[in-house]
Every structure is written in structure tokens, then in C-alpha cells.
Amino acid sequence: MSAKERKGTGISSQWRGSTGLVTRGADGKVVFLFGEVQPSVVCSPLEVCDIELEAGEVVRDVLVGDTVRWKIEPATSGAVGGQAIHLIVKPSEPGLVTSMVVTTSRRTYHIQLKSNASQYMARVGFEYPEAVSSRLGDINARLGTDVLPGAGVPAEQLSFAYSVSGNASWRPTRVYSDGVKTYIQFPSSLSGQDAPVLFVVSGGQNRIVNYRLKGDMMVVDYQIDTAILVSGVGFWNQDKVTIRRGG
């Protein structure tokens, strides 16, 4: 072989021999991530291997390297309009290795088939990257309209125009308002500890105000402009954090 041919066969060999992601699906199905590597499906002469394709996918061609010692039969499952194609694979004897190419209306599968005297994969299926991306997009879309803790209104209806200054282990992770109340969210590590005291700056004086603490959320029943959170006793042992609206 020429240098280019050796390089090409080396690349193909590396792809065929790579170990890809294999997980367990429903009902004991062996699930491969489509397109990552060439999946290797192990079958047995006295058993049936069921390779399930994506629902709604139409098979165009099934090509097998060894058509004499490997038998491939199609089957279907599911309701009309959303049926899934199954390829039922049976080898005639153990110790065989061949390849199979399946072309469909959506993609092309390159699968390696191996036969073993007793071990086999009863059910095989695939996870598709585009399907994962689609589900992730749906989740992100829902998160975009989800309500934030405490406020009970969609995120786009809240104002996050607050600045937080100062250092403390319990420094708020975010402050926001729904136009009526102010919500101060602390790190989850605050649970089980004494919460800081809230002072609202009014007329040049710090005034203690009423608030409710629900888990890691402090709720004040009106919008605050400037407030100070204080924890600890004595000047040197106090931690202070300042909150300003519009800063």
C-alpha cells in the first residue's frame, strides 16, 4: 500500500477499534451513541440479536459483508406513523466477524457484527446527538420561563438592578424585586446557621426591618434602596454586606 493508503486504513482501523459510549437503556437494551465509533454488536448462533432503529426512520438498504453466514431480517414495532424498524440478526456459527451498512431516510449506520458461542446482545439501540440537543433546547426554553424561588413570577418580570458589596461567607448570590417585594437569596450553606440581620438605611440611620426567611431566601415586603446585612458581635468580629438598588 502507498503511504496515503496506509494512513487511510490506519484512520479507519482506529475508528473501528475505538471504545465508545455504551450505556444500558430500557428493558436491558444496549445503547450506543450514534456516530461516535463503529458499534460492535455481538450475536450468538442459537439466539436472536435485535437492533432497533429510531422510530419513524425508513430503511433504504441493508448491506452485509458476509451474506452467506449472517442472516438479517426486518421487523417493526409501534403504531402506524411512528413505527420503529428492527433488524433481527442471526449468525450461522461462532467466531465470525463482518460489517453491516444500513442506509435510512435519516442517516447511515456502520455496524460491526461478531458471533460468539454463548454470549450475545439481545437488544441494541442508539442515542442520537441531535435528539439530545433538541431535548436540551426544550429544557432551556422551559427554564427561561420558569419562576425564580420565592417570587412566583417569570424571570423576565423581575428586576435584578441591585449591587452587592462586602465579603462574608453568607454573601447573597443574587438580589431581585418583583416590583413589590425584595428577595435576597443566600448560598445554600447558610442553612443551619444564624442568618444575618437586615438593616435598611433611611434618613442616614440604620433601621431594623421585618423580613421572612424561607430556607436560603430572605423576603422583605417592600422594595429596598439601600440595606446592610450584619452578622457577628463586636466591631472586629462583624461581617457586613451592603445592598444598593440601581448600583
Image (cartoon, helix red, strand yellow):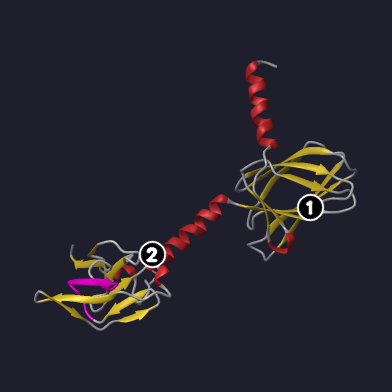
Residue 228 at x, y percent in the picture: 22, 71
x%, y% of residue 72? 80, 47
Label located before the other in sequence (1 or 2): 1
Query: Is the residue 44 above or below the residue 78 in the image?
Result: above
What residue type is disc 1 on? Answer: Met
Residue wearing tag 1: 121
Q: Is residue 146 found left or right of 101 in the rendered image?
A: left
Q: Which x, y percent locates residue 121?
A: 78, 52
User: Which residue is depicted at the point 61% across and 45% down?
Assistant: 107
Residue found at x 27% / y 76%: 197
As drawn, the residue found furthest toward the bottom would be 210
The secondary structure type at the circle numbered 1 is loop
The amino acid pointed to by label 2 is Gly
- Across and down, in percent, residue 11 comes to 64, 29
Label 2 packing within 10 angstroms: few (<14), some (14-19), many (20+): few
Would you identify the image quadrant in which residue 35 lies? top right
The structure residue drawn at horizontal position 43% and vertical position 66%, both measured from the top left corner, is 142
Q: Which stretch appears magenta?
A: 222-234
Pick out the residue farthest to the top: 2
Outermost residue, left side: 203
